[in-house]
Image: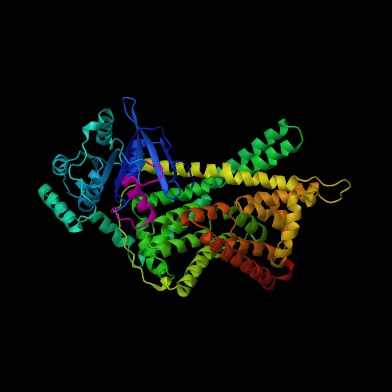
Amino acid sequence: MIESPVQMFPPGMLFALVGNPNCGKTALFNRLTGSRQKVANYSGVTVERKEGRFGAANGRFARVLDLPGTYSLYPRSQDERITCDVLSGFARGEKRPDVVICVIDATNLRRSLRLFFSVQRKGLPCVIALNMMDEAKARGIGIDARKLSELLGVPVVCTVAVKSGGDRELRELIEALLHNKQALELPKDISNDAIPAEQDHKRVQRILTQLGIDHLVPDVRSARIDAIVMHPVIGPLLLVTILFLIFQAMFEWASIPMDMIEEAAGWVGETVEAWLPDGWIKSLIIDGIIAGAGGVLVFLPQILILFFFILVLEESGYLPRAAYLLDRIMGSVGLSGRSFIPLLSSFACAIPGITAARTISNPRDRIVTILLAPLMTCSARLPVYTLLISAFIPSHTLDYGLSLQGLVMFGLYMAGILSAMTVAWVLKVTTRTGRQVRPLLMELPTYRIPSPLSVCIGLWQRAKIFLRRVGGVIMTMTIGLWALLSFPSPPVGATGADIEYSLAGILGRWLSVLLEPIGFNWQISIALIPGLAAREVAVSSLGTVYALSGSEDAAAEALIPLITQQWSTATGMAMLAWYIFAPQCLPTFAAMKRETNGWKVPVIAITYMLILAYLAAWIAYRVTPMMLPTHLM
């Protein structure tokens, strides 16, 4: 996630959206701001910060801040603390909101009003957006918004964030406040935060009684769905099926757009090559910039497909239930079900998985989840896995139409998951806090149809973050690799390939001494260097290394048959084992450092992953010849 200054839009009146998790706050934020929003981090803290701009009909505008969801102003996690700091005026570089929009779940007024009272005691002008009114009516909950406004002494408007036009009343209220800020008075009774919880409970109960909705109304629809989804046998089978379909879609749906991106990159390279004269500038643009960008952008469709499913499952209310189903399994290795969502996000990229761990209130579980996130098989590993599987695993079809190559790919995913669970178990039995039982307390929200607008905006934000990364670290490292491979020029009378005299060639020979026991030659050693910045570059790096180190005929060959001829099967298996564990992504460890405010956790992660990678590759290199016929070795 990017770091940027807090001020992202021109100065203007600041509205802050505050509410419980799953109250529809973010959907309402997306409805108010549309595409006029940006995502960054709070200054000095890796907590996602969403700010947008609201444009009124009269040409005025306002800044809108979507604060992390919280149940109270007594923070238990890092994101909840940010909400408290912003409302109190303690957030670095952020002014206190001019108006707080308390987004209240109309189906759970009892819980939401307690948060409203806490916000009001901060001395901030408040309005209430009574959201999910359609669901409340469907369940027979009738709320008189005008009477509620009289009882609370603040404006109350009704909203349905998931429907077009569902924010009309709130828009009109914001425009009125922009026209006349003094129309909203400060709370008359501002007291300290030390009011007993029982006093708020009694006040909420009195209001509910006056509204005639003091009785509990069960959510029959969600209960019926949960009877299947949360079933002890059907539930886990359904979860496995959903995850299987997600990963299948990542491969099947992404194939066409990935081919289009590859063809586009090739066409751009050929066009530029025809126009530029020979020289180092031509090599830099074609071999460095175009090839590097194309080699990374090709995986954008897979990342967006994964995030699409994550966003849909999150908005539908299913993800908390998946976390509940996995709580017993994860508890056996010293984690809780809350770690499921961050680890699931890590299958796209470990960085959002690491930042998602901020929602875990237990410090020990949060740190362990951060340490495990890089072991999940992120999309950046896919090109390496695909290359090596295509080169060394026969394309056989087994019984029931199962593909041998597909089973190996599934096995690699499972190896990442099992290794993460093993590391978590080791930490459980070797640390005192790991043995403590931590029961999972998690709200199971109402099932609802995901908002297409929120899903589209979420995908657009993820695409922008990925493209910034391509234009930043990955592109820099790609160009850096090109420079290492191209300079210095070979001395006069040199008989070897140019790359042997380059800085990368010299460094590759040094590294090969260390990596020779696991079967890695100097070409592989060179290709691992840019992989430290991003695994996605490894395949294109191998192509560049072999093209520059071989003859003209070898350079013209495809990479798969080339490594099939020059590597042993044992080397191919060793490299697969290496990539399951190897810490080859510096931005991931930079995110760890920002998230934990120090280098201790990143150093621990890099150390244990390097040890596991070397041991796994050494075992694979030694065991593979024993398991294969002589002619395949």
Q: Position of residue 581 (x, y in %)?
A: 58, 62
Q: Which residues fall within the magenta stretch?
A: 72-94
Is 143 in front, or is 360?
A: 360
Is 541 in front, or is 503?
A: 503
Q: Position of residue 278 (x, y in %)?
A: 77, 35
Q: Residue at x 21, y 50 (%)?
A: 109
Q: Quadrant of the C terminus?
A: bottom right
Q: Is residue 107 left or right of residue 249?
A: left
**Image height of 200 relative to 100, above or below:** below
Q: Position of residue 220 (x, y in %)?
A: 23, 56
Image-quadrant location for residue 221: bottom left
Q: Is residue 138 visible?
A: yes
Q: Residue at x 52, y 61 (%)?
A: 600
Q: Is residue 447 left or right of residue 365?
A: left
Which residue is farthest right? Answer: 493
Q: Is residue 455 magenta?
A: no
Q: How is the image coloured?
A: rainbow
Q: Is residue 169 left or right of residue 551?
A: left
